[in-house]
Amino acid sequence: MQHTRWTDIHCHILPGVDDGSDDMDETMIMAAQAEKEGTSCIAATFHAGVDLLDARLYRPLIDDLNRRFQEKGIGVTLVPGAEVVAGFMPDNLADFAINGSRYLLVEFPSSHLPRVAVPILRAYRDRGFHPIIAHPERNPSIIRDPNRLFEMVEETGSLVQVTADSVAGTFGREIASCARYLLKKRAVDIMASDAHDHDYRTPGMEAGVKAASKIIGRENALRLVRENPLAVVTDCPWETRAPVDAQAF
């Protein structure tokens, strides 16, 4: 299948950093998998919270990985990023944004959506950031009542990122149903891999794009992995979106 370059803003590809890639070998396999399915730019997100206050520690690792990819002929470029625990507010919060942009990937607890979710997102907005809510389709509170997500987006202007495997059905019927409902309601801005390894939670997004295409059409589905995430990594205002530039990465 012919691909136009895709951008993945949520991927735990850094080796030995969190619960993602275990080692350099796995990272190289993940990068090759991503390229095979059409991804050319990956935000190397890691779980960020109070136990890590200097995101710049991983910049040399990202540079090293990009050199390794180039040496191996893997056409993927990594950019810095993080998956920030909701409520994490260090003074250097800008270091955790995606590729030096004002876009911040925010993860709420996997068990529930806290009552202070809206104030947290507003606090990020007040500090000049544009929050992206990570994988809400996997949150039990939103699965039970998707209107909670719609209200959060309405009140805070936050963006929504769903996981490709959620749409494809990898995580089960309940999560797939929620993800597909959010797509039908046009509540999804970005689809990403949230990859952690090379055999179960992989960087491949084609299955998710195919499933999404049945709901919102192929071009709209591709926009979730092409123009929209590219706007994030290039720090474009969301209202204007970003044209796909083959020379961007």
Image (spheres, helix red, strand yellow):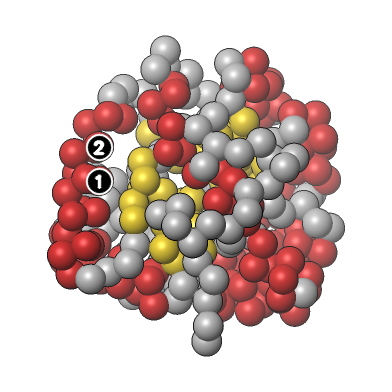
Q: Could you tell me residue 36's position as x and y percent? A: 39, 77
Q: Amino acid at mark 1?
A: Ile
Q: Residue at x 64, y 60 (%)?
A: 224
Viewer-proximal residue, 225 or 118? 225
- The residue carrying mark 1 is 62
Residue found at x 39% / y 17%: 92
Give the side of residue 29 with respect to residue 245, left or right: left
| Viewer-nearest residue: 147 or 56 | 56
Residue 113 appears in the figure: no
Which residue, as the protein is rendered here, is positioned at the far top?
Answer: 91
Q: Which mark is residue 59?
A: 2
Label 1 crowd (10 A; few <14 / some 14-19 / many >=20): some
49 left or right of 220 in image: left
* Residue kind at label 2, given as amino acid type: Arg
Q: Position of residue 216 (x, y in %)?
A: 78, 70
Say left or right for 81 vs 128: left
Q: Is residue 151 above or below residue 32?
A: above
The one of 175 and 156 positioned closer to us in this rendering: 156
| Among the 4 quarters of the image, the one containing residue 112 | top right
Q: Is residue 141 above or below residue 214?
A: above
Residue 177 drawn at (x, y percent): 72, 68
SS state under label 2: helix
Count numbered badges in the picture.
Answer: 2
Residue for point 71% across, 54% down: 188
Tell me whether circle 1 and circle 2 mark residues in contact (CB < 8 Å): yes
